[in-house]
Amino acid sequence: MGLSIQFLFIALIVGWIIRIPFNYFQVRNIKEVFSRLDKEGELITGAQKDLVRGSCIVAIAIDSNAIIKRVMYMKGFTVFARFKEFKEFNGKTIKEVIDLCPESSKDPFCRAIRKSLMTALEQKSKMND
């Protein structure tokens, strides 16, 4: 009994140590994407956690007219997830995209997009007041 607990403990520690370089590369990928999108326009980011469907991080570049220039997202459970481009929203306004992602959606991507764009709209309206 004692040997199996020791083995389990050692296996957990080894797994945790092996995970460290993968986390490094994932964080580096996130920084690169955020930096690239920040150069394209105003950067809006958001995240949505979902234990069943996998968490999602979104990065959105918008221009000064609130038109979406580019959307990138990372969705998944593991450190192997990488950003992918979502071209369907390019050229649409923030309000159009919010309408395309209903509040009742269960998809973490749609929820992350909606939440981040709603926050951006609220901040823009406060700045204009």
Image (cartoon, rainbow, N blue to C red):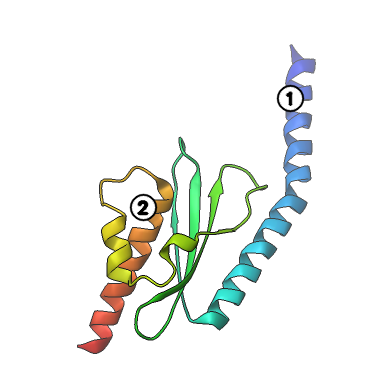
* Screen quadrant of the C terminus: bottom left
Callout 1 environment at 10 Å: few (<14), some (14 to 19), or many (20+)?
few
Q: Secondary structure at mark 1?
A: helix
Q: Position of residue 85 (x, y in %)?
A: 55, 61
Relative horizontal placement of residue 57, taking residue 66 as reference (left or right)? right
When asked about the image quadrant of residue 32, the answer is bottom right
Q: Which comes sooner in the sequence, label 1 or label 2? A: 1
Relative horizontal placement of residue 110, taking residue 2 as reference (left or right)? left
Q: Amino acid at mark 1?
A: Leu
Q: In front here: 80 or 8? A: 80
Q: Is residue 64 above or below residue 96?
A: below
Residue indicated by mark 1: 8
What's the residue at 38%, 52% (across, down)?
A: 110
* Screen quadrant of the N terminus: top right
Q: Is residue 69 above or below residue 3?
A: below
Q: Amino acid at mark 2?
A: Arg
Q: Position of residue 80 (x, y in %)?
A: 67, 47
What's the residue at 72%, 58% (across, down)?
A: 24
Seen as rendered, the residue at the extreme left is: 129
Between the C-alphas of marks 1 and 2, the distance is: 37 Å
Callout 2 environment at 10 Å: few (<14), some (14 to 19), or many (20+)?
many
Relative horizontal placement of residue 82, taking residue 111 as reference (left or right)? right
What's the residue at 33%, 59% (across, down)?
A: 114
Relative horizontal placement of residue 17, taking residue 39 as reference (left or right)? right
Q: Can you tell which of label 1 and label 2 is closer to the viewer?
A: 2
What's the residue at 57%, 82% (across, down)?
A: 39
Residue indicated by mark 2: 111
Q: In front here: 85 or 1? A: 85
Q: In front here: 70 or 11? A: 70
Q: Secondary structure at mark 2?
A: helix
Q: Position of residue 28 (x, y in %)?
A: 69, 64
